[in-house]
Image (tube, helix red, strand yellow):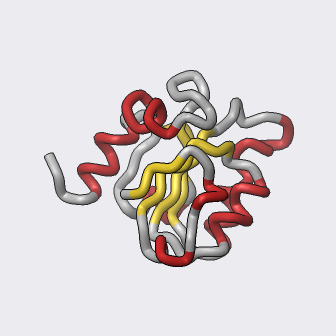
Amino acid sequence: VLIMDSITKVAPEDRGALVISASHGGASSGEFALQVPLHLVFFNDAGVGKENAGIAALDMLHDAHVAAGTTSHTTAKIGDSADMWYHGMISHLNPEAEALGLKVGEKLSSAVLRLLGHA
């Protein structure tokens, strides 16, 4: 699991990783996430916004068959990945993330650790 304050820090050597990014889940973040084939990536929903702009990356990543989700902006600070890991609650998931068994309303860290087989 890679935890980063900004999705702009994702690098080619992160291929296949589970990334927790405290960036907003908008289209520009989705573009960065698409540059490296990731297994799973999380963003902050940034309040979702007009026309779902804060979670646009989820559909972009769905189109590329990449699991993605967001945490609620009311539970984790945008740009603060440690806060997102320790306090973030899942607010939105794309179908690939749901297929992994993740659920809206779960604490992000607990869900990811369960996914990895850790109690």
Q: Residue furthest left?
A: 119
Q: Position of residue 106 (x, y in %)?
A: 38, 36
Q: Residue at x 71, y 55 (%)?
A: 29
Number of marks: 0
Q: Is residue 88 left or right of residue 45?
A: left
Q: Is residue 75 left or right of residue 51?
A: left
Q: Is residue 33 left or right of residue 80?
A: right
The quadrant where residue 63 appears? bottom right
Q: Residue at x 44, y 36 (%)?
A: 82
Q: Is residue 29 left or right of residue 49?
A: left
Q: Position of residue 113 (x, y in %)?
A: 26, 50
Q: Residue at x 62, y 55 (%)?
A: 7
Q: Position of residue 102 (x, y in %)?
A: 39, 51
The quadrant where residue 46 appears? top right
| Residue 67 vertical placement versus 118 (above, below) | below
- Which quarter of the image is occupied by the N terminus? bottom left
Q: Residue at x 85, y 36 (%)?
A: 50
Q: Position of residue 22 (x, y in %)?
A: 57, 42
